[in-house]
Image: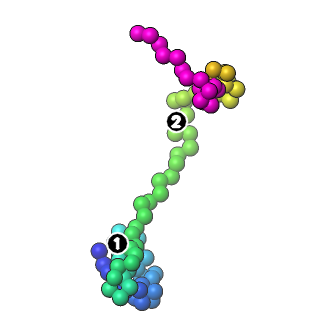
Amino acid sequence: MSKVNVHEAKTRFSRLLRRVAAGEEITIANRGVPVARLVPIPAETTRKLGFFRGQMTIPDDFDAPLSEEVLSLFEGKRHRSKKKP
């Protein structure tokens, strides 16, 4: 990890970014005191459309209103009854 002062970081910012893009971490210091760090960000992964095609289905009533019993559980109005063993 390299350490540069603020003045050098301002005057050579593009060069520092190239070094960071290559994987280096750079600490920026103000009067010898570290104040920031330039680090590479992980490469973004692209999503492949249709990756799960055919592996799952959505039922026709997916967006149908909930039953009163289920809705009351979500709203905290009624507790679910426990089954006896």
The quarter of the picture where residue 79 lies is top right
Residue lying at 62% horizontally and 31% vertically, measured from the top left: 75
Considering only order in the chain, which callout, 2 or 1, is on the residue closer to the N terminus?
1
Residue extending furthest toward the top: 85
Tag in front: 1 or 2: 1
Residue lying at 62% horizontally and 27% vertically, measured from the top left: 77
SS assignment at label 2 = loop
SS assignment at label 1 = loop
The image position of residue 43, as x and y in percent, is: 44, 60
Q: Relative to residue 58, is residue 19 depicted above or below?
A: below
Whether residue 14 is visible: yes
What's the amino acid at mark 1? Glu
What's the amino acid at mark 2? Phe
Nearest the eye: 25 or 77: 77
The quarter of the picture where residue 5 lies is bottom left
Nearest the eye: 77 or 26: 77
The image position of residue 15, as x and y in percent, is: 42, 82
Residue lying at 41% horizontally and 9% vertically, measured from the top left: 85
Q: Relative to residue 75, is residue 1 depicted above or below?
A: below
Magenta stretch: give its range. 71-85
Whether residue 60 is visible: no
Q: CA distance from mark 1 to mark 2?
A: 38 Å
Q: Relative to residue 26, is residue 77 depicted above or below?
A: above
Q: Which residue is mark 1?
A: 25
Residue lying at 29% horizontally and 74% vertically, measured from the top left: 1
Q: Which residue is mark 2?
A: 52
